[in-house]
Amino acid sequence: MAVYTVFNVAVLVVLGLIARFTDKNLVEKEASGYTTQNLVMVAVLAAIAGVLNTGIGNLWYLANTSLGPLGGALIQGMFMWAYILAAFIVRKPGVALAFGIIEGSVEVLLGNAAGIGTLGWGISQGLAIEAVLLICGYSRFGLITAILAGVASSQFGTLWSSVFYGWDPAYSKDVWIAVPVNMISGAVFSGLLGYVLAERLAKTGLLRSSRKK
Amino acid sequence: MSQSNFLSFKERNSTLNGTYPFIKLIWVFLVAIGLFIFQTPISGGIMFLLVLTLALGAGKISPVEVFRSGIIVFGLGFLLMLFHFFINPGEVVWSLGFLTITDYGLVIGPVFFFRLSTIVLSSFVLIWTTDTRDLMTSMVKAGMPYRYAYTIFLALRFLPLIQKEVEAVQSAHSIRGRAAGSSFAHRFKLWQRYVFTILINGLRKAEVTADALECRGFGYSEKRTYVKDVHFKTADLILPVITVLILAGLIYMEQTSWKALLGL
């Protein structure tokens, strides 16, 4: 497990550095501290994502418990689009992690099939996005950063899955084989989808936060 | 009746309903930590029975509620146990083609069944016996910043509104085109439209709500008052204290005899 943890942390750092040096979409850093509007937006997004993720979660749990790491890898990335969306709308340090905890809490209280264990995914996936954005100085919010943050969160979330479900990477080769699948899933279903939704929301001009820019 | 009908808070005249909400949350975390430390199915099995007894006795949850809410989780736990039978290394005790069951898998499989089932069952006990508003109030009293506790509460407050929004959008789409009996691709497109519409409407509501909250001076004063207050009693500590003692006893038994008994 130690090797797998080090591998996952290294993946985060590498993805963060790639995002920092390739994403040219540089924006001004937002003032720190959450406004009431930020908090309410996070709450609403967490409620929407909590409902959707609890539904998809049952399918994912079934795939993971019966087929192991490879079973759930294909849909592993389907849970973090809202994390990316929240981070890209609010653009402040800690939003992805806070979102993960709040969305996880909503899922726990909705009766998610992993119980309090859901918070583990919320924290690990939120932390991964924070790590990528931190390396980018919270000032790069382009497609590349979104995709790489999606990849990072999807892969880093498997660390908690391994602990929770007892997949020991030392003898379970599936954990390693699933890595590229997790990453592709995270890139498409979390990074790309989250970015497209953020862009489409901004284009509508309905949100005050997008009108400012 | 769906799972969610059974899995919700109900006012009951039970000991667990009267226990301080934050203490129950700590108890859930304690149970989870214990289940992660356990290495034998004996400890997991005992803990599962204790949590089940607590739910039925001190929580006055009916066996039907436990069964209907937990059936999916116990099923998933069973599948996870089967997966560990086959995946873990050890002496082969049964094989059919490429499928082999090992002795270590047979011991460790139930550990994961009990881990998943007990952690989720304890989380369900929290849901059955705790009003979310009381939980948030107790968390604020324990030192959690009010604005953040309120964010979680607000997310839960928005859930029924979102549910109604989904129904309204579905009805609007049904009136304008065929929704039932259409292809998967068409349904996927519809789903995309639902999500986007719900997102837009939800976030617009969020802006209005934020304005309304600020107009009312949300977060202005550090001192908080509550319409429905919750009060901590020293007797509430009995639950986590007994749990810690039981966990310590089970871990001790594991290390001194059960692990050797199971050949671990």
Image (spheres, coloured by chain):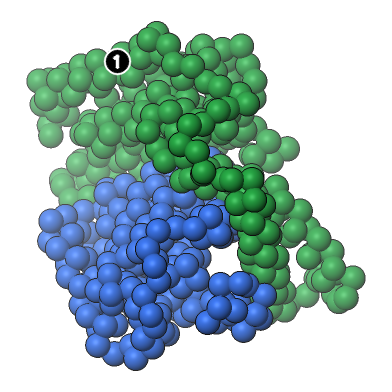
Chain colours: A blue, B green
Q: Which residue type does callout 1 highlight?
A: Val
Which picture quadrant has residue B27? top left
Which picture quadrant has residue A130? bottom left
Instruction: Provide residue B87's location: percent of width, then percent of height.
Output: 26, 53
Instruction: Provide residue B251's location: percent of width, then percent of height.
Output: 18, 24
Secondary structure under the numbered disc 1 in the rendered image: helix
Left/right placement of residue B11 relative to residue B53 reads right
Q: Is residue A74 visible?
A: no
Residue A107 or residue B156, whichever sits in front: B156
* Category of crowding for the residue at label 1, using alpha-carbon neighbours closer than 10 angstroms: few (below 14), some (14–19), many (at least 20): few
Residue B182 or residue A27, whichever sits in front: A27
Left/right placement of residue B219 relative to residue A150 reads right
- Which quadrant, please, contains the N terminus of chain A? bottom left
Task: Identify the residue at horizontal 60%, vertical 51% (top origin).
Answer: B214
Instruction: Provide residue B47's location: percent of width, then percent of height.
Output: 34, 23
Task: Identify the residue at horizontal 67%, vertical 75% (top origin).
Answer: A206
Name the residue tied to disc 1: B241
The correct choice, above or below, for A184 with respect to A32 in the image is below
Which picture quadrant has residue A180? bottom left
Host chain of mark 1 = B
The correct choice, above or below, for B247 with respect to B103 in the image is above
Task: Identify the residue at horizontal 64%, vertical 39% (top origin).
Answer: B3
Q: Residue furthest right?
A: B175
Task: Identify the residue at horizontal 42%, vertical 11% (top origin).
Answer: B233
Q: Is residue A136 visible?
A: yes
Residue A94 or residue A212, whichever sits in front: A212
Instruction: Provide residue A147's location: percent of width, then percent of height.
Output: 39, 79
